[in-house]
Amino acid sequence: MADLTVTITLNDTQQAIMNNDLLDIETWIEGAVTGKENNCWKRMQQEWTTKLMNDDSFTDSIPSNQADFVALVTAREDYLTRSERDAAENN
């Protein structure tokens, strides 16, 4: 996967609203993304650790670092992204 860059455009009204509560909009957005990433990681790690432990055909060790864990999981034939799971569910 390539790095992903996301651009968000806020109009003057949206900026004024956010500046009423936030010290720095960009810092808040970065923190929100980091928080969501951490929550998604926790759910992914919990879900896939359980799946791997219950998979009799999986005999390797479960990686302890995040990058190796994600690489292992996303390379599996039974791995689906959220959009792929939703599409499969709707068919």
Image (spheres, rainbow, N blue to C red):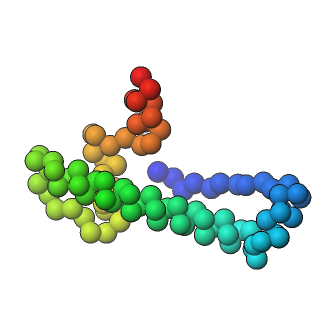
Q: Foreground: 17 or 61? A: 17
Q: Where residue 7 sits: x, y (%)?
A: 70, 54
From the top left corner, tell me how far across and down residue 2 is, in percent.
51, 53
Task: Say which quarter of the image contains residue 13.
Answer: bottom right
Does residue 51 appear to the left or right of 16 in the view shown? left
Q: Quadrant of the C terminus?
A: top left
The percent position of residue 56, horizontal first and vertical second, equals 10, 47
- Name the side, left or right, on which 56 lies relative to 7: left
Q: Quadrant of residue 64?
A: bottom left
- Residue located 45% across and 34% down the image: 86
30 vs 60, left or right, is: right
Report the residue at 27% width, 40% height from top: 77
Image position of 79 with respect to 59: above or below: above
User: What is the total number of numbered labels drawn onto the structure image?
Assistant: 0
Q: Residue furthest top?
A: 91
Report the residue that reaches farthest toward the right: 12
Q: Along the line of sight, which residue is nearer the eye, 71 or 64? A: 64
Residue at x 45% of width, y 30% of height: 87
- Against 31, residue 2 (above or below) is above
Residue furthest to the bottom: 23
What residue lies at 60% left-to-right and 65% top-to-bottom? 32
21 relative position to 30: left or right: right
Residue 33, x across and y down, in percent: 58, 62
* Occupied quadrant, residue 20: bottom right
| Foreground pick, 83 / 65 | 83
Looking at the picture, tell me which residue is in the foreground, 32 or 1.
32
